[in-house]
Image (tube, helix red, strand yellow):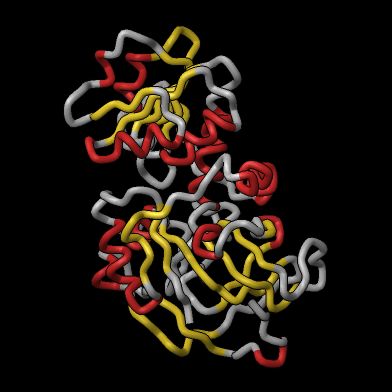
Amino acid sequence: MAAPSSDSIPSVNKAWIYSDYGRSADILKFDPNVLVPEVREDQVLIKVVAASLNPIDYKRMHGLLKAVDDLPIVPGFDVAGVVVKVGSQVKKFKVGDEVYGDINETGTVRPEKFGTLAEYTAASEKVLALKPKNLSFVEAASLPLAIETAYEGLERGELAPGKSVLVLGGAGGVGTHIIQLAKHVFGASKVVATASTAKLDLLRSLGADLAIDYTKENFEDLPEKFDLVYDTVGQAEQGLKVLKEGGKVVTIVGPAPQAIFFFLNSTASTLEKLEPYLESGKVKPLLDPKGQFPFSKSVEAYAYLETSRATGKIVIYPIP
């Protein structure tokens, strides 16, 4: 994809934006005249090709980050696109590079006011990596926040070769990556994951040694115990019941007693570390079967995300 020359970058662009808190369907508005963000010295300007949605986007719309936010906001954390302008101190990228990343370095402390649901967005070079050549922009956009979260949680939980892990919520955006990374990157001896009936084959295809149908079985009744329980659905306390002595529970849903709870600090170093696994196909992006929505249908995309029924990721593409 050819990058626009710097003199052809417009001063305004099309974006989705909200100026109040509430349900996405009520507050998210299309605006064809949003100012293109200024680029700081350590940032690049990206012509957005694809952007993916994450639960943090709608939770933020509901007011989760009200204490640190500054309305109005263009939502969106994940991006894949082409560099069209570089700040004076940028060393890693040049105009024309195809990049991807989660643009919010500290998404819950100083979240970017101008996100990725726009024709252009600005991002610090430290959160961006070159797009793996074998991935489409849509596939690349689906990855950053989810795969970085999966990776950081496995590190915090000290998963290592020979250890076992139970993934609660294996079919979601983060869960699908936890399974793959646990098996193919961290060398887990056993990966067990939960999902609904229709998604069990998917879990096995991603590398789960045992797939548990949570509509029919209770993971707390398993005869075995685990070195790590990674909770993506809000069952951290139940997870404690199936821990080996010295094991850990990691959760991304909210603080829970005796569990490690964290918010992602976005960094390109994780994406760069995982590049060989992505390029070899050992670790794959997973898009929801109906999870590709054009830019004009962003409100419908959020409505689908909010059902919590998506398998893998929802991506906005094409973006004008």
Q: Is residue 209 above or below residue 102?
A: above
Question: Whole-percent x and y of residue 119?
Answer: 52, 79
Question: Whole-percent x and y of residue 80?
Answer: 57, 65
Question: Whole-percent x and y of residue 184?
Answer: 57, 31
Quadrant for the N terminus in the image? bottom right
Residue drawn at x 56%, y 77% is 120
Residue 44 vs residue 181: left or right? right
Question: Whole-percent x and y of residue 18?
Answer: 37, 74
Res 159 quadrant in image: top right
Res 193 quadrant in image: top left
Residue drawn at x 29%, y 26% is 212
24 or 228: nearer the eye?
228
Residue 64 visible to the viewer: no
Residue 308 vs residue 14: left or right? left
Number of disc labels: 0
268 or 65: nearer the eye?
268
Q: Is residue 206 above or below residue 29?
A: above
Residue 244 vs residue 171: left or right? right
Residue drawn at x 28%, y 20% is 219
Residue 313 visible to the viewer: yes
Q: Is residue 313 above or below residue 240?
A: below
Residue drawn at x 22%, y 35% is 197
